[in-house]
Image (cartoon, rainbow, N blue to C red):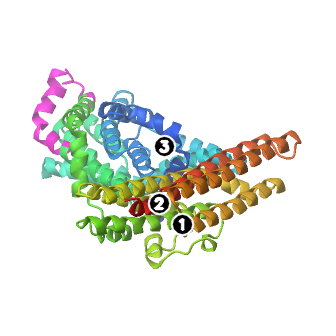
Amino acid sequence: MGEFKFWMFLAGLGIFLFGIYMLEDSIEKLSGKAFKRMIRRYTSNSFRAIGSGVFATAILQSSSAVSLMALAFVSAGVIGMSQAVGVIIGSSLGTTITSWLVASIGFKVNIEAIALPFVGVGGLGLIFFGKTTRYTQISRLLVGFGFLFMGLDYMKESVELISAGFDPATLKSFGLWAFILSGLVLTAIIQSSSATIAIVLSALYGGLISFEQGSAMVIGAHVGTTVTVLLGSIGGNIQKKRVAAAHLFFKLTTAIIAWILLPVLVYLSMTIFHFENEPVLALAMFHTLFNVVGILIFAPFILPYTQAIEKIVKVTPTNIERHVQKLDAEVPEGAVGSFGIELQRLHRLVIHYNTGVWSVDANLIVQLEPEDIEIVGETKPGSEAQYQLIKQLYENLLAYSVRLHRLSLQQEEADKLNHYLSSMRLAMNSVYSMQEAREYVGELESSSNPLIKTYFHRYRKNLLEFYSLIIKETHSELSVVEIGEEFQKIKQKIKDQDEEITHAGFQDIKDARIEQRHLLRLLSAQRSYYQSCRQAANAIREYLLSKTITEAH
């Protein structure tokens, strides 16, 4: 047996996890509407998702890489859990292509040939496109994908002497269970079922093990791939952990079925498909057959399967969930009133996030209360972490509102709740729009062109004035008509500012004071900024209209 290279393994694990992080982060920042539509289209139903998993694995020659990509897409909110499970199930069949290649032509995947181009092209992209956000994120995605493979390669290389010195024939006296266990452990260590299967095929070809023993090792290798995905879910959100669990249960179930049907599958592989004299090809057929059986069993039940996983892998309540769970939804009047208080909290957090994106001190506009701080913690205003917490609060309040709708509400309370829900939805849409603007804000702020920085500070000044104005309106006692008039003025003002900046931008490019690429970034930021402010104004208007209902009734 060879030497275990600890530091190489640790470096490989670090590079692997860093690659996962870069992959997820870049996917999240790249996942605009068009990108999400494309991915969702190819995974829109169970069979499409499975087909995508088969195809992607056949191309990349790594079910682990495809499964990790599915984890990244789930974490970034691009696809749902059932779609990711479909992709993962498909990837298990796609990986049999490697078995056929190894068995038929002795093909061996060179991970360096995959990793180095990704890292090289992505690294150069980060240097040359450093100030162009979209291309920067594409470059980070390439580097992340390359690091993912490179980390796997380091981990495999760190233990390759161990695997090279492993002789499956030494297990002959222990029975088939020992072969299953060895296939599992070997795959978990070297992070590649393909490498394990190559070892098994070599041993089978050399007559060191029987076909049944080789089949048992392939079953073990099938389960061993789950370790890579479990590693990829480390530090992830609950959806990632659920997908990793779904992957584990699928692999375990398929392995158990393959074990139970082992005599039948061996007979089919050797006799029905006429591979009696080609045990290596017969083993590739065995690998394919039990994966097909697994897919046929799971494919019709992906949705109930994912629902069962969601019940098994439960969410540990966060500060937000514990906070919302304290609200009483049993007494209608008090429940709607509590919802109104939480809506005001959401508004404060939205203001802090939206202004934080533009580096405006929201404390100049509105102070957070102690319970607000408990929800967002020490997260930086305008950061991705704060965005996720606000989104989580919104989702929990939305779930709470469903409970309220089941109550027998008086007409007054029902009308008020409808205004609250409309206000909450508009406030969150405002955050979504500002999240899109965040992509361009960094470029404006760090631009070497003084004129672009002038635009950036102009946005900040307008944003401070806008939120100061609508907060002032929340403390006013206005009638329905007055609310309509005041907010029409506010929306007209932000529209005028939008047109002024757009006109100034075109004039500056006409006078050659800024480049066309700067104008495109400026207009993209302006569009999202304007939409966010308009939605925020409408959110506050809906909240103020809710306050007039008692008087109207």
Mark 1 is surrounded, within 10 Å at the Cα level, by few (under 14), some (14 to 19) or many (20 or more) other residues, namely few
Of marks 3 and 2, which one's residue comes earlier in the chain? 3
Residue 277 within the segment the image draws in magenta:
yes
Per the image, the residue denoted by label 2 is 543
The answer to whether residue 101 is magenta is no
Label whose residue precedes the other's in the sequence (2 or 1): 1
Mark 1 is on which residue type?
Thr
> Image height check: is 234 above or below 224?
below
Tell me the kind of residue under disc 3.
Answer: Ile
Q: State the extent of the magenta-drawn residues as a range.
A: 254-281
> Is residue 209 in sight in this rendering?
no
Q: Secondary structure at mark 1?
A: helix
Q: Quadrant of the C terminus?
A: bottom left
Tell us which disc is closer to us: 3 or 1: 1
SS state under label 2: helix
The residue that disc 3 covers is 111
As drawn, is 275 to the left or to the right of 369? left
Label 3, secondary structure: give it.
Answer: helix
Across and down, in percent, residue 188 comes to: 32, 53
Tell me whether the residue at label 2 lies in contact with that at label 1, contact meaning CB atoms closer than 8 angstroms.
yes
Of residue 246 and residue 289, the one placed in the foreground of this image is: 246
Q: Which residue is mark 1?
A: 474
Foreground mark, 3 or 2, reads 2
Which residue occupies 15% across, 26% down?
A: 268
Residues under labels 3 and 1: Cα distance? 60 Å
Q: Is residue 38 above or below residue 482?
A: above
Residue 332 rendering spot, x and y as whole percentages: 26, 64
